[in-house]
Amino acid sequence: MTAETLVPPRTEPGALPSGGEHVTLDVDGMSCASCVARVEKALGGVTGVREANINLALARADVTLGAGEKVALERLIEAVRDAGYDARARGENAEERAAQREAAELETRARLRRDVLLLVVATVLTLPLVAPMAGMVLGLDWHLPVGVEAVLGTIVQFAVGRRFYVGAWKALRSRSATMDTLVALGTSAAWGFSLYLVLTRGEAARGHLYFEGAAVILTLVLFGKILEARAKASAGDAIRALAALRPQSAVVLEADGEREVPLSALRVGMQVLVVPGGRVPVDGKVISGASEMDEALVTGESAPVAKQAGSRVIEGAINGNGRLVIEVAAVGEDTTVARMIRMVEAAQAGKAPVQRLVDRIAGVFVPAVLGVAVLTFAGWMFAGGGFEQALVACVSVLVIACPCALGLAAPTALLAGTGAAARAGILVRDIEALESLAGADMIVFDKTGTLTLGEPGVVEIRPAQGDEAALVRLAAAVQQGNQHPLARGILADASERGIALPRAADFKVVPGEGVEGTVDGVSVLAGRPEFLAGRGIAIGDAQLADAAATPVAVARDGVFAGLIGLRDVARDSARDALAALAAGGLDTVMLTGDSQPVAEAMAREIGIGDFAARMTPEKKSLRIGKLRRAGHRVAMVGDGINDAPALAAADVGVAMGSGTDVAMETADIALMRSDLGLVPAARDIARRTLGKIRQNLFWAFVYNVVGIPLAAFGLLTPAIAGAAMAMSSVSVVSNSALLARWRPAAKARG
């Protein structure tokens, strides 16, 4: 995923590029699922747009263009405005989007302050209207003059109700209807009927007025909107926390001294200074100095991480007591934090398949409710209930029907769930990844670097002739530049022995087998014994004394030169993580390129019963395909580099890459630190998030299915209907917000 997938570059003035590109708009003014349906319809009607997905919780539109199409950005914004809403393009880089987020948050806080003040005024004006009803319960015969009731009710109707009238008018102009339409019609009917009685009957109208009903509805709906806005804002804390990790400036080391510059001025290769207690401004490599860093907010790792020359550092980490000089490796949109923000935003903007159905229902929900309200009024009149009773039932139907809860059910749960996962160091690419992981019944693990530390050390050297150092020199020389863990182990051994390595020519990696090249004019092969056998090189009965060690066979000019044995160490978290997965009813499998004895020894050590040895990357991919054809839903956990084919072949790929570029760019789910305990934790948050979506949708549907008939049959007053409608949205958002309290059950280390 790149920045361009969010806001594509312009190919000509005012035009967006073609070929299935995406553009993201921030949309203001949406309040319910009917609004979502209207904006999607408006954007989908623009020529050149293939699909438009709207996220109510994020107030965001993701527009996909058709292949070969170009669409003016202004045309998309105009379509949204014609539908009665406002829109603006998201920034093209991290700095612009951060500025937009800050401006939006300031506006949200200002709007909340205004709404709270308006709520106080509305409450003060509404209480005198409901006080006589409370007095009746207590046996007190006290009432307001009807003229005072009319004045108080009118102020509330138009001071608090103004927003609903504006929304209803916008919907009417676009020939549609929303929640604002229902509230405006319902309260206007109650207020208008009451005002008519006051003007025609005077004090004789007492006992037949509904000013208090309209005022209570508007006050409670406003209260619900305030609670909803606060809950939605807290659900977005994850992205705000990530954005806050990015400092505004950095200290650059130059020939003539130090200079503070904005982050936008940094370039790869520059050297920056990080003082004790300072926040790292870039991704990079330590050039000099030693310290410990707090990377908790980036990777979820609570323990300080030691850093020294050569160590990789991540933007946003907090430096300890040491002074560090860092060479810049990535800036701006390419840093780990920037990619994390993009990945979390993309996941939160996704839409569950069930939500697409809900949105289609919402498109006809409000018109259907208007029809039910008309039928309710007609039914009561036909049954002889009288105009007043018919009007009260009609108003109750209009007020209680709430598409808001339907529209917020899935996106708020997704927002909270992916945010909680990100804080724990689990990045989710999209809703499909959550669904696949939650539904998986088998977890397949790579061994090296996943179940083990990926740092095998040399434990045995058996040269066919000559001494050990000569064999190590030959094997290490041809492995230079190879990032395989076994290669790193051999190179580390050569370094410890102080062996000077000649440069290798014609270097070539044979995936899953080994390497070949030319060293000092001699052809050298190093890899699995089967790799040499396939080249016609016989190794005879040579074998390692340690059956659990992985053998690397070396050949020189087509002649077997010896074996080097390496052993890896299982991660401390492996056994507990596997046990947790088994307790959850999942089957676990280990796939490794190692020999059968090595694989068997590791399987016994970590407690995994099913494994397969001598698996090349291609064979791993084929094995996963076979498991899927057998009916399993498979999750593959690997390092994100050598396991790319297997990760792609699985239903969901989980890369445990400690925040590496490849892990976050290729995986469906990326674990930001090498802790196997995050695998069961990821499945847990996936299941909880989908569970919240199901809970929210169930109660949102039940609320409407039960509430509308009760209102139609006159069993609910307008005031009670208004309270129920307000609380329905609040309950959905609050239920989703509970996910923000989720934490991994345990944190094993290593």
Image (tube, rainbow, N blue to C red):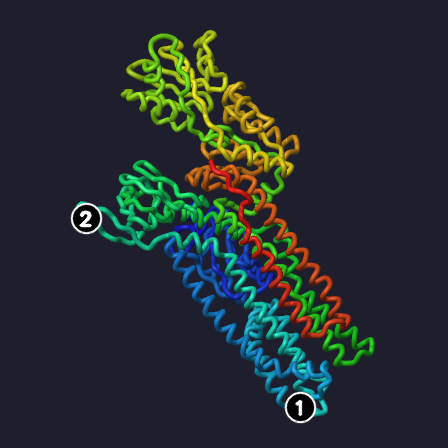
Q: Secondary structure at mark 1?
A: helix
Residue 137 x, y percent position in the rendering? 72, 81
Q: Which mark is residue 522?
A: none
Q: Return the residue at label 1.
A: 199
* Residue farthest along the left direction in this orientation: 256
Crowding around mark 2 (Cα neighbors within 10 Å: few <14, some 14 to 19, many 20+) is few
Q: Residue at x 48, y 51 (%)?
A: 345
Closer mark to the observer between disc 1 and disc 2: 2
Dot 2: what SS? strand
Residue 718 placement (x, y as % from top left)? 69, 74
Q: CA distance from mark 1 to mark 2?
A: 83 Å
Mark 1 packing: few (<14 Cα in 10 Å), some, or many (20+)?
A: few
Picture disc at residue 257: 2
Q: Is residue 109 left or right of residue 497?
A: right
Q: Is residue 258 visible?
A: yes
Looking at the image, which residue sits at the far right? 383
Judging depth in this view, the residue of 634 and 164 nearest the camera is 634
